[in-house]
């Protein structure tokens, strides 16, 4: 074998969208004609409002909806409107899209604001690799690490300002969280409710007695917590019991009140004005509550998401919706709708536990069977492929994919690696595992064994490579990018299991580690960073390209990716075991009769023998192999 840098460079010639962005006007421009809503679009919006509230109420609220949309549209400069009219929505996401997930303050520097520190880190170390930042809720909050929002319209001054956010927009696409299922108990809306303001009387789901929800109705409610769904609060009008899906400090909004929907639309459009290119609908599963049902995945919830999609198609067609629904896979993918009318992207919640299962067992069969079942609905929808996040590794998504024994085996091994397990109550009130709380590096590696650090990094990178090659858009949590290990002290200090993966880091320490060629972080930066950089330049990794899973060996995960034009093919292979593995790949059966192949990652070359490539892979090897002639273009 030999390394051929010229051919690698040729293979990496790619093409993708111009990711520069126009900035919205600070003030609306009413000197030009107001936006006119096409009749067919207006009818669709009216129909969706009618589904939720009935035609009479829909008629009453259409003028307010039109006003909100016209105000937003008046903030758009003409060059933005012109650019959107020429955009190709099927090319909204490309092979160049990789999303970094982070809190705004995970990196600290005493001389700069957290958001400025994050910007400098990304510009210094991630340029050309990461093109999108998902900054987890950066608003003032009272609990749940940002997900109990006090003020939707203000940047937490401890992080920075709207100017800092908009400064990032000039370099990266931005994902904002739409935490619209609930608000903080300290939020002005809820305070007005407590004070008896009639305008906010029905903003929340409130009862005079806990007994208004029967024991039978409580059993039906699906929620990821073991606490009571109703929280007792004192108000000017006496004691009330409010619906709280997640915690006593997180009060659910009442979408049966159309005023709530109108105000939320204003908030989401405000986010777009401040630079949001993607809006993540947090915990959207629980948006609409209806006693007597599971209160999850209700038709009204799907209709609201479709309503949002209709609005974006009209006024901000370049902005994408992504739904975060940690539920069984079949229910999760229902948020695609028909592929064109609901979420643009769906969190691929089944992927993380399936990858853990694969590396714990050294067997790719379950992962391969599941991956082979994934189908693309349209050119404007796809998966958000992630392995770790600010929360834990959800288990609900694989309930119908893995057996109970296989799930328990994942939990047992992860616990041996230092994990905590979070629980929810089932319909009988029994606690069941809901998520694994652990960092991704620790999930793959024992912290105190005698394995060489380079070998641990190789295993870690091999696992991450699977999320990089599957069809969709990859996402990487900051701690998963740099290989942070479990923070047990943080769990003990905060009494929060999720704190294990939310360590605040000193930016200068990160700088020093990256400059030390022998450090774990330098190892990860070289190996994972190289894969990411290569991935963003290969057209075959476009989300709309074809995907074909090959089940040749249980030791090796193999997926063939092809460009949308079908003129570039990459055979992606990951050895998921700690042993040397061999596989015979029948290339002429599914790609081409080309007998000369090239590994884009290592520069190695192979010659097929009678239509078969005989591949030997060292432990946790990653290979991206392409027909030789395609690398010379």
Image (spheres, rainbow, N blue to C red):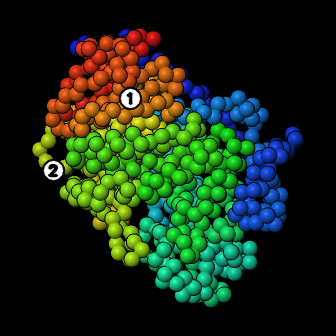
Give the residue at x 32% y 16%: 598
535 relative to 42, above or below: above
Residue 520, quarter of picture: top left
Which of these two is toward me, 245 or 546?
Answer: 546
Q: Where is residue 467 shown, x and y percent of the image?
A: 38, 39
Which disc number belongs to residue 457?
Answer: none
Q: What residue is shown with label 2?
A: 448
Give the residue at x 25% y 59%: 405
Q: What residue is shown with label 1?
A: 560
Name the side, left or right, on which 171 lies relative to 480. Answer: right
* Dot 2 alpha-carbon crowd within 10 angstroms: few under 14, some 14 to 19, many 20 or more: few
Q: Secondary structure at mark 1?
A: strand
Residue 410, quarter of picture: bottom left
Q: Answer with mark 2 or mark 1, whichever residue precedes in sequence.
A: 2
Q: Secondary structure at mark 2?
A: loop
Q: Where is residue 379 shown, x and y percent of the image?
A: 57, 35
Which mark lies nearer to you, 2 or 1? Answer: 1
Residue 488, quarter of picture: bottom left
* Dot 1 alpha-carbon crowd within 10 angstroms: few under 14, some 14 to 19, many 20 or more: many
Which of these two is toward me, 625 or 14?
Answer: 625
Name the side, left or right, on which 274 lies relative to 385. Answer: right
Give the residue at x 54% y 69%: 295
């Amino acid at each position: 074998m030999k390394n051929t840098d010229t051919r690698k460079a040729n293979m990496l010639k790619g093409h993708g969208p111009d990711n520069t962005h126009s900035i919205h006007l600070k003030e609306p421009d009413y000197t030009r004609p107001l936006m006119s809503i096409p009749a067919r679009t207006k009818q669709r919006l009216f129909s969706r409002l009618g589904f939720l509230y009935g035609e009479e109420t829909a008629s009453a609220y259409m003028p307010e909806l039109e006003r909100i949309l016209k105000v937003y549209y008046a903030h758009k400069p003409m060059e933005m409107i012109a650019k959107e009219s020429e955009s190709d929505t099927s090319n909204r996401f490309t092979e160049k899209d990789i999303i970094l997930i982070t809190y705004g303050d995970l990196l600290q520097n005493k001389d700069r604001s957290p958001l400025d520190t994050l910007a400098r880190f990304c510009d210094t170390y991630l340029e050309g690799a990461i093109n999108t930042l998902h900054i987890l809720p950066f608003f003032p909050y009272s609990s749940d690490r940002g997900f109990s929002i006090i003020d939707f319209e203000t940047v937490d001054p401890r992080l920075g300002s709207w100017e800092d956010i908009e400064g990032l927009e000039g370099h990266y696409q931005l994902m904002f969280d739409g935490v619209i299922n609930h608000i903080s108990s300290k939020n002005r809306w809820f305070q007005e409710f407590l004070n008896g303001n009639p305008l906010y009387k029905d903003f929340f789901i409130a009862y005079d007695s806990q007994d208004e929800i029967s024991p039978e109705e409580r059993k039906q409610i699906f929620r990821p917590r073991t606490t009571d769904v109703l929280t007792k609060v004192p108000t000017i009008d006496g004691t009330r019991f409010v619906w709280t899906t997640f915690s006593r400090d997180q009060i659910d909004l009442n979408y049966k009140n159309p005023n709530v929907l109108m105000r939320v639309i204003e908030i989401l459009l405000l986010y777009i004005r401040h630079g949001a290119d993607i809006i993540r609908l947090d915990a959207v599963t629980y948006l609409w509550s209806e006693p007597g049902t599971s209160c999850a995945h209700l038709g009204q919830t799907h209709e609201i998401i479709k309503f949002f999609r209709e609005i974006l198609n009209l006024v901000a067609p370049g902005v994408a919706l992504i739904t975060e629904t940690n539920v069984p896979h079949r229910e999760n993918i229902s948020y695609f709708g028909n592929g064109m009318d609901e979420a643009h992207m769906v969190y691929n919640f089944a992927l993380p536990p399936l990858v853990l299962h694969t590396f714990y067992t050294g067997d790719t069969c379950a992962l391969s069977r599941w991956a082979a079942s994934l189908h693309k609905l349209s050119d404007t929808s796809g998966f958000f492929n992630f392995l770790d996040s600010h929360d834990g590794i959800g288990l609900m998504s694989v309930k119908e994919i893995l057996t109970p024994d296989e799930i328990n085996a994942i939990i047992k091994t992860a616990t041996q690696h230092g994990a905590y397990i979070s629980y929810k109550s089932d319909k009988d009130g029994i606690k069941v595992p809901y998520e694994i709380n652990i960092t991704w590096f620790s999930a793959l590696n024992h912290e105190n064994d005698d394995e060489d650090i380079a070998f641990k990094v190789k295993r870690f990178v091999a696992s991450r490579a699977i999320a990089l090659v599957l069809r969709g858009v990859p996402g990487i949590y900051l701690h998963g990018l740099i290989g942070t290990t479990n923070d047990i002290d943080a769990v003990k200090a905060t009494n929060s299991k999720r704190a294990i993966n939310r360590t605040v880091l000193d930016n200068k320490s990160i700088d020093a580690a990256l400059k030390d060629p022998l450090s774990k972080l330098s190892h990860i930066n070289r190996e994972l960073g190289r894969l990411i950089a290569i991935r963003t330049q290969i057209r075959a990794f476009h989300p709309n390209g074809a995907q074909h899973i090959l089940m040749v060996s249980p030791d090796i995960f193999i997926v063939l990716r092809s460009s949308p034009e079908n003129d570039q093919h990459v055979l992606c292979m990951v050895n998921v075991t700690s042993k040397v593995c061999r596989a015979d790949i029948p290339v002429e059966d599914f790609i081409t009769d080309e007998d000369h192949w090239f590994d884009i990652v290592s520069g190695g070359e192979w010659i097929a023998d009678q239509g078969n490539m005989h591949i030997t892979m060292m432990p946790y090897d990653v290979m991206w192999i392409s027909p030789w002639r395609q690398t010379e273009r």
